Amino acid sequence: MAADADTLDIAPLSGPALEVALDDLARLRIAVFREYPYLYDGTPDYEARYLDRFAKAKDGIIVVARDADRVVGCATGSALSAHHQQFAAPFLDAGYDIDSIFYCGESVLLREYRGRGLGHAFFDRREAHAKERGYRFSTFSSVVRPPDHPLRPTNYRPLDSFWQKRGYRKAEGLVTTFSWKDIDREAESGHPMQFWIRELAA
Ligand SMILES: CC(C)(COP(=O)(O)OP(=O)(O)OC[C@H]1O[C@@H](n2cnc3c(N)ncnc32)[C@H](O)[C@@H]1OP(=O)(O)O)[C@@H](O)C(=O)NCCC(=O)NCCS
């Protein structure tokens, strides 16, 4: 059961405060990303390393939502150029200036805290951070699953309308592949990831 809104706190963490929260954040990401459409079979060690890298990346930010002392959500972001080549390659091919693009990594929130505006707050914080640092575009990627995927819950609602309302559009042809192990697979496999993009207001 979620607590009252006045016990909720949302803030970027860094340094020692982030160090203390890393294990909780890793657990949170593993729990939320096991759900459809990610179906990600994560490990705490990998997650802790991933988050630490994000925190240290150029213009990196980790926004953390806490209910009293409990970590209930987080969102990441950094310069697109700080990531693997497979992130930047589609943008380079499409003629973008990579240094003008901020990458919103992911947003995760425990189910009982959804629907009260934290998803918007995660974007607000990261987009403001990107604008302050002079970025022109904000982007993120989303996994593409076939509509008849056997693990798709019957009540699943895609987040597309939320993202469109935030000013993002699917960037036609900007698709890359990330590999991870799905919960129903024995080994890692490649997953198509669609980029979404918006221009940040001046
Ligand atoms: C993405 C996520 C953090 C959004 O959190 P949230 O706190 O529920 O978002 P908000 O309350 O700010 O709602 C955002 C909007 O999306 C809508 N929305 C919320 N849940 C939705 C859902 N399951 N499907 C479609 N729209 C949804 C809300 O109605 C709201 O619309 P509004 O602005 O018209 O009111 C959360 O849904 C989540 O953790 N999902 C699982 C992980 C994930 O898929 N992350 C995104 C890719 S990394």
Image (cartoon, rainbow, N blue to C red):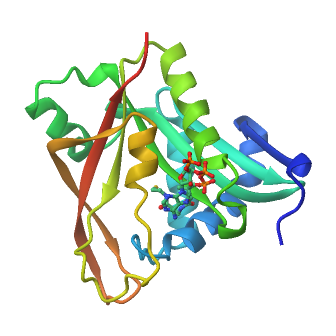
Q: Position of residue 109 (x, y in %)?
A: 63, 60
In the image, is residue 181 above or below residue 56?
below
Considering depth in this image, is 164 or 85 the residue closer to the camera?
164
Task: State which quarter of the image contains the N terminus.
Answer: bottom right
Q: Give me the residue at 32% from left, 19% from top.
A: 100
| Left or right side of 55 for 57 | left
Left or right: where 61 falls relative to 82 = right
Residue at 66% across, 58% down: 25
Q: Is residue 157 left or right of residue 27?
A: left
Q: How many marks?
A: 0
Which quarter shows the C terminus? top left
Residue 12: give x, y in percent of width and height. 69, 36
Front-lying residue, 79 or 161: 161
Residue 167 occupies which quadrant of the picture? top left
Seen at 69% across and 62% down, the residue is 23
Residue 37 vertical position relative to residue 88 in the rendered view, above or below: below
Outermost residue to the top: 202
Q: Nearer the viewer, residue 110 or 160?
A: 160
Q: Which quadrant contains ligand 1?
A: bottom right
Residue 83, horizontal then vertical, whole percent? 34, 40
Identify the residue at horizontal 43%, vertical 74% (top origin): 40
Q: Is residue 133 left or right of residue 111?
A: left
